[in-house]
Image: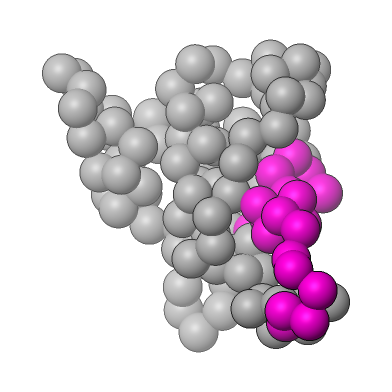
């Protein structure tokens, strides 16, 4: 799982600002769970355990699905099915670029991410 950062533009993005506070936290959590292609498993119980583990009042499946749906409507994530699993994807340009694009490599050092210069 690549390291990602939250760019300052995240906090001023009007799409993010229109979300509820829990949905913003869920989006940040999803960002941290993505693979090199920006994909993550949309498993409501897993996401709830990761994003809201310390909340006194746990979110139900209906609350979680509502937040996922709001992220899809805001075009912050995409969702599709593959091999019977629901997969989410955060496009790199929207809103979290991988940290590796900001880290300057030393001359002669190769990228560790496939397909990246």
- Where residue 110 sits, quadrant-wise, is bottom right
* Direction from residue 9 to residue 55 in the image, left or right: left
Of 57 and 112, nearer the camera is 112
Picture residue at 36% right of the left edge, 47% below the top: 47
Q: Give the range drawn in magenta.
A: 89-110
| Magenta segment main secondary structure | loop
Q: In this view, does 30 lie above or below 18?
A: below
Picture residue at 44% right of the left edge, 22% below the top: 22
Picture residue at 69% right of the left edge, 59% below the top: 100
Q: Is residue 26 above or below residue 20?
A: below
* Residue 7 point in image, percent of width and height: 71, 32
* Residue 19 point in image, percent of width and height: 61, 19
Q: Is residue 48 above or below residue 32?
A: above
Residue 29 visible to an observer of this rendering: yes
- Where residue 12 sits, quadrant-wise, is top right
Q: Is residue 95 above or below residue 15?
A: below
Magenta segment includes 55: no
* Residue 23 point in image, percent of width and height: 51, 27
How is this picture coloured?
Answer: one colour
* Direction from residue 84 to residue 79 in the image, left or right: right
Of 61 and 39, nearer the camera is 39
Picture residue at 82% right of the left edge, 49% below the top: 93
């Amino acid at each position: 799982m690549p390291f990602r950062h939250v760019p300052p533009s995240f906090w001023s993005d009007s799409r993010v600002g229109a979300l509820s506070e829990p949905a913003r936290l869920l989006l940040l959590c999803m960002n941290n769970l993505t693979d090199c292609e920006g994909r993550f498993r949309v498993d409501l119980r897993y996401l709830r355990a990761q994003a809201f583990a310390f909340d006194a009042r746990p979110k139900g499946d209906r609350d979680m699905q509502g937040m996922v749906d709001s992220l899809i409507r805001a075009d912050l994530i995409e969702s599709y099915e593959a091999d019977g699993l629901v997969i989410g994807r955060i496009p790199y340009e929207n809103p979290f670029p991988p940290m590796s694009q900001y880290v300057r490599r030393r001359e002669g050092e190769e990228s560790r991410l496939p397909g990246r210069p």
